[in-house]
Amino acid sequence: MRKFPDTLVKIIETCGMNVNQISKISGISNTYLTKLIRKKINHPGKDKIASVLLALNYKISDINRILADYDYMPLNPHDIPEILRNNRRRRFEGRIVPHFDYIYFELLMAALEHLGGTKILVNNRPSGIYLPMDLYMSREFPQESDDDAARFFKAFTHEVVAERKTLFLDNCKKGLRYETYMCKACLEESLDRHIGIRAQGRSMERVGLYAVYFANAVAATLKFPEQHLHRVVRRCTHFQFQIQDADGKVPKVSFTADRRHYFFKEWEQLRVEGFLSDAASITDLFLKEIEKCRSGDYEAGAASSPEGFADYIRSQFRLHGVADLFENALGSLMSDPGMTLH
């Protein structure tokens, strides 16, 4: 029997985490990883290699080079279902876990959607789950060292985001609650950046997609006000963050970096998005922050009700002269009584 190199074993042994921790964050069983390290598995499965390395924030081009050590072809769309199945088994317990840009972050968010429970978000705008797919996929993607990696990265991102949206809609049908608190000044800066006169000069098509994005959020809160709570508040927090299963025994908090200014176009590989933790001292800190956002002292007037939130967003699109784009998107959503997204 051919003997393959122990590249993956060496990575696991030098990554600073034990087998149990790697099992939790990758979705690969402890038993499988233990057999691998003890040399009882000579040729690990392609999906196992990819899932472990993705959990450790390896770039796609680097994963492909390691796969070649095991005589595997580069990652391709046929590999995505197995990797997603592994991702659904991920657990996050007792450790602060960093999450990086795009696919690493989205894989984490998809795994958190599987936890269910109440989700609370503190951000400068509504949840990214409301972004239409065309808008999400129009982002600038990381530069990979070869075309195979670049194509896979984009296809994989699309499928992970699609799974997140499916899980979100399934959780909505189950009656799970979503609370979102947005700093008024941050929200207005975001709107100006994406639908203002400069944005209109760059691309009206993109402005139209942002109209759809906000229509998705407004329609959710208008149709299901007890389930989808959006509040504009006069409180700007130091972190953007979300808490998954906020009412559960062990909530998970994901706190995210917010870098607003970019001085060059070249993509920075593996940009840190933030961290995830379920440590009680961390979650308690952010739950206290949410209580302050919930306080009436910080509410931005009429924008604190579902109708007020809708009117406020409508007024912002009117201010920038693109109210018709928002009204058209919202009208088509409101014609369907169910929970739908453009």
Image (spheres, rainbow, N blue to C red):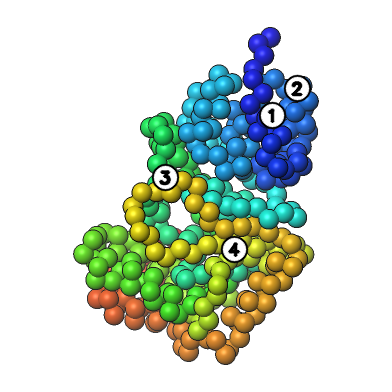
Task: Residue type at mark 3: give it.
Answer: Pro
- Residue 278 lies, in percent from the top left, at 71, 60
Q: Which residue is mark 2?
A: 39
Across and down, in percent, residue 65 comes to 51, 27
In this picture, residue 182 sits left or right of residue 15? left
Task: Tell me the amino acid under the disc marked 4.
Answer: Phe
Q: Which residue is mark 1?
A: 9
Between discs 4 and 3, the one toward the N terminus: 3
Q: Which residue sits at x=69%, y=20%?
A: 42
Asked whether 329 or 42 is in front, the reply is 42
Q: State which tag comes first along the sequence, 1 or 2.
A: 1
Q: Around disc 1, counting alpha carbons within 10 Å, would you say few (fewer than 14), some (14 to 19), or many (20 or more)?
A: some
- For mark 4, give the secondary structure: strand
Residue 199 vertical placement versus 264 (above, below):
below
Q: Which residue is mark 4?
A: 255
Instruction: Kindly identify the amino acid type of the residue bearing the numbered disc 2.
Output: Lys
Q: Which residue is mark 3?
A: 142
Quarter assignment of residue 207: bottom left
Q: CA distance from mark 4 to mark 1?
A: 31 Å
Residue at the top extreme?
1
Horizontal and vertical percent for residue 210?
35, 64
Q: Earlier in the sequence, mark 2 or mark 3?
A: 2
Closer-to-camera residue (315/251)? 251
